[in-house]
Image (cartoon, grey):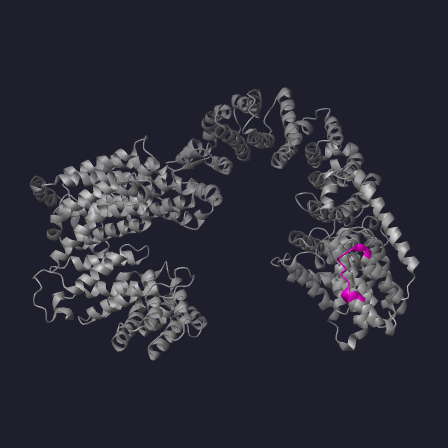
Amino acid sequence: MAAVAEHTPRQNEELETVPVGEEDDEHDSKEAVLQKYFLQEWKLVKSLLDGIVSKGRVSDPSIARKIRSIMDKYQEQGQLLEPYLESIVSPLMFIVRSKTIELGAASNEILKVIKPICIIIYSLVTVCGYKAVIRFFPHQVSDLELAVSLLEKCHSTSSASSLRQESTGEMEAKCVVLLWLSILVLVPFDISTVDSSIACNTSLDEHEPAPLVLRIIGFSKEYLSSAGPMRTIAALLLSKLLTRPDMPKAFSSFVEWTNEVLSSVPDDVMNHFRLLGATEALAAIFKAGGRKLLLDVIPIVWNDTSLLMKSSNAARSPLLRKYLMKLTQRIGFTCLPHRSPSWRYVGKTSSLGQNISLSVSRNTHQCNYAVDDKSSSCLQDEDLDVPEIVEEIIEMLLSGLKDTDTIVRWSAAKGIGRITSRLTSTLSEEVLSSVLELFSPGEGDGSWHGGCLALAELARRGLLLPISLPKVVPVVVKALHYDVRRGPHSVGSHVRDAAAYVCWAFGRAYYHADMRNILEQLAPNLLTVACYDREVNCRRAAAAAFQENVGRQGSYPHGIDIVNAADYFSLSSRLHSYINVAVFIAQYEGYLYPFVDELLSNKICHWDKGLRELAAEALSALVKYDPEYFANSVLDKLIPCTLSSDLCMRHGATLAIGELVFALHQCDHAILSDKQKHVAGVVPAIEKAHLYRGKGGEIMRLAVSRFIECISLYRLPLTEKIKRSLLDTLNENLRHPNSQIQDAAVKALKHFVRAYLVAAEIGGTSDIMSKYLKLLADPNVAVRRGSALAIGVLPYEILASRWKDVLLKLCSSCAIEDNPDDRDAEARVNAVKGLVSVCEILTQGKKSSGINFGEDDMSLLLLIKNEVMMCLLKALDDYSVDNRGDVGSWVREAAMDGLVRCAFVLCKRDSVNYNGESFEVEHVAELHNSDMIENNQLSLIFDANLATNIVGGICKQAVEKMDKLREAAAKVLQRILYNKIAYIPHIPYRKKLEKIVPDEAGLKWGVPTLSFPRFVRLLEFTCYSRPVLSGLVISIGGLQEFLRKASLSALLEYLQAIEIEHEDERKSREHMLSTDMLWILQQYRRCDRVITPTLKTIEILFSNKIFLDMGAHTPVFCAGVLDSLAVELKGSKDFSKLYAGIAILGYIASISDSLINARAFSHLLIFLGHRYPKIRKACAEQVYLVLLQNDNLVDEEKMEKALEIISETCWDGDMEAVRLKRLELYVMAGLDKQQLGKTSGVGKKVGESQRKQRDADENASYSSLVGSSGF
């Protein structure tokens, strides 16, 4: 009672925390539960249906489409709609029936009414199935003629939606009416009594089909030739109609018709569909008809079926073969009398109560069951007369199990199960033996798959007796691991999936007593597939089979724990399955060694390279459970495989040995000396066998590099000869052009040098350094790439002797090469990475050696500040381009990462006092904020100028055109501002930056609409405005429309955000922006990569009235722009640059300042004589607009004449005529004609000199070719 009293207040609190309106489902109303868990859109559907019912028709076709779209969402969960079917179908079919009666089936209006309704009903048929829907169709006897007349009307109307994307309802109307007829023909009266056309005709024979029936059969036969769903529904209708007791003549006539169809084997498409329809109709008839009716026609139908199965039509059509299999099995099923075999295994039922009662009474009645039923079983076996045709049918079904298509094999497997259920125990054993023969090694994957499906069907139906399991289970185990290599891939995933289905069927079919030994045999194999199969569907199928067996076969050791670990979601990731799930399961007894055998036998030598690498890692993850076994037995198996003739085997074995050695090192398990010698000799043996050559050489190099890395971590004893051999191997891999091989070699070199060169104190380590430094200037780009990376992983002991040479040499390697033929972006990227890594190693090495700050330390840090940081800042301006695009972006991205890492190096030193004691980040921040270290000597290491350059350079990358770089730059800024290890001081406007770049992980900086509005705010700070603007103009003047809009809107919002009362602030922003624009035009003079988008940006800003209202500064800005245009446009062939420049000249010529506009107008008139017709035409348009806007450029009396010349002259025509017209305009504007000639002459001379220079150096290098292409 005390315990109850103690828990009562807590329960009351929990009840109080339950939100209002959230009640238990048990107390909710039926409607609330249905809406919560079933059709969630029911309110919307109900309102739409009410509108349809109230109006008696669908007023808007979009209503039907909306309801259909809602229903389609439940395609895979149709049972959720079943509670609503009556509420939906009944009123809609009532409208169809009533409107047909009201309007008459012959009227054209009826189709307009029923077609939208039939779209809704047919959507329910596709989701829930026809059986669930037709239960709510009206089925009065009087409706039969009505439905036939409606079908006739639908049939006579040609479809208008065959080429339309959205159906208009013709097909749906036919399907729904056919379904309606399929239930109406079951009326329990003679149909001739319903047919009004023969009410006065008494000459009809007793069994002669009524005209109404003939009409139905006629329509159905036509629909059997259809390619749509009408064919299947027509077959269903015929099966219901022709199997009635009063239809013997109609049935015989239809069989004769099918005989004609099946006997003729035409090749045209329409007759092929008719062949499909006739076969499907026969299959449906043999399913619905009685045995007495069907026995007479079996010889004819079977003869047609067997002949058709051997024809070329069947060979070409999987669907036809599927229907023939269905028909074959139903013929056989009809030939055998109905019987419930006494020998069948009575297993578990779907009812829990029956299962409990069966398990209690099973032992009591087992003896009587065995004695009494044995004699009756034998009696039935003797009495059963099996027709000869059944043997042929079984042979055809067995051949169907080998078919190339899954749908045919699946149908054949179900047929085997159904027919076996009516055979004797002796014959069933023969069937089982025939099925097991399908698993012979010579059979294909289709045969194995069909055999598994057949075994599953036999087990599900209790036809596979427990006494047969010992010979079945080994076959199933083989199927679980079936994987046959075919060229560069393998087949067998469908076989493994089907084998898991067999195991699942075993768990559902048999009692625990019969499955105890079988499950012990199956469980390791199922879990092996669940953890290590390549395909996710096979892993999940095996896990589901194991879960089914654990749940139904009683207590299984650790079964629940394993099921919880290997669930549906955890097995979705192959990596997680191999490394986590399998390792967890292997801790339990009986699973470790099967797992190891699977990895060694099938996965280490798998055709998929990624799977071999994963298998080696998975094998090493199991070492901790039995290190002795892996160190002896497993290594003995793997070492000979490294020289295998099979590439996959030797690659996987080499990887596996390396991973095992590393795992044994982590477990502190020593390898025996003789094994160490064998392991040490793996790489020399591979080289001696020349296994790097030919196909697979690159893969082996990767594996060998990883192997050397692992034995270096283990510090395996090696002879001097082997050490030199391994070092040569790594050097060769460093020279390889494949970047993956280089990366793997660099990782191995890092640990190899520490383990065998530095640790052993071997002389000559300086030779390695000299060699790599020399190779940095090698003509081979691959050698330069590998050498730069190699230097970056050398230990402090090697770098310390020549650290200055190393840093300076790497700095020079980061710069763009002078010779265009030697330029390589990857080499510069690796040089940047190596440079940054060397800086970190040198500073960390000094710190770990316990040496305090001294002159050497200060000189190192000053070199990093003055040389390394400047080199990295220059790398941010690497915009190299080749046929792969902006390859310089790789260098810039590496440089951003290097800048922040080197800044941390400097600032960590800055935060260490002379005694070697380090402060906390917060304390260092306080010191910097309070200027306590302002006069400190170490403040020379990292100053405000350096901090400004770093942040400004990174902010420039944050507003450029590449999404990847913008995101990388923003993340680098976050590292700078919020680093927990080292505080970076002297950053101007740090608080403002922290607002722009908050410390949030989920921000998508690559999205332009997020990043640009934030970073554009940096334009108000003079220290950041110029680098930010130089990056921003690239985005605004670029070719990407979405990026251009986002960046431009951000800039305009920044310029126009200040309200009217802050007009001075707005003008100051414009003034500052204009000054920075002029700086960009001067800084990047003749650099089209920047100048062209900058001119486009200025043009866009002019069009938005920016820079035109700055008072006295407007002429100054325009004069600066004109000076730049005079240089940039002279001799230019870039159309986009020329267009932008001409537009800018037009805007400047329209301003009020007479000196500036006259100068701009003069430039415009010069371009009227440009050599490119399009440029002349564009310039003429600008001149015309300028004259309309500014009437001070030409005298008023000459204005009309000037406009007439501009508008009537063909500026893209003859050059001489154009220049004469231009001269007239020059005179009208009062400009000096000599200046025009002088300018033209200069342009001509410049053009000729440039042409001569181009001719002399044309295609001198690939870079010039790319540059001339406009990249």
Judged left or right of residue 447, residue 1215 is right
Provide residue 877's location: percent of width, then percent of height.
76, 48
Q: Quadrant of residue 440?
A: top left
Q: Is residue 514 magenta?
A: no
Provide residue 832's location: percent of width, then percent of height.
72, 41
Judged left or right of residue 617, residue 127 is left
In the image, 623 versus 869, the foreground residue is 869
- Figure label count: 0
Vertical position of residue 1092 compared to residue 378: above or below: below
Provide residue 746's location: percent of width, then percent of height.
65, 34
Q: Quadrant of residue 144?
A: bottom left
The residue at the far bottom in this view is 54
Vertical position of residue 684 compared to residue 266: above or below: above
User: Does residue 1159 show up?
Assistant: no
For image coordinates 61% across by 36% down, the residue present is 740
Judged left or right of residue 360, residue 874 is right
Provide residue 876's location: percent of width, then percent of height.
75, 48
Q: Quadrant of residue 467?
A: top left
In the image, 445 versus 903, the foreground residue is 445
Judged left or right of residue 153, residue 933 is right
Q: Is residue 1207 magenta?
A: yes
For image coordinates 11% across by 71% down, the residue present is 199
Q: Quadrant of the N terminus?
A: bottom left
Point out the stretch of residues depicted in magenta. 1205-1216
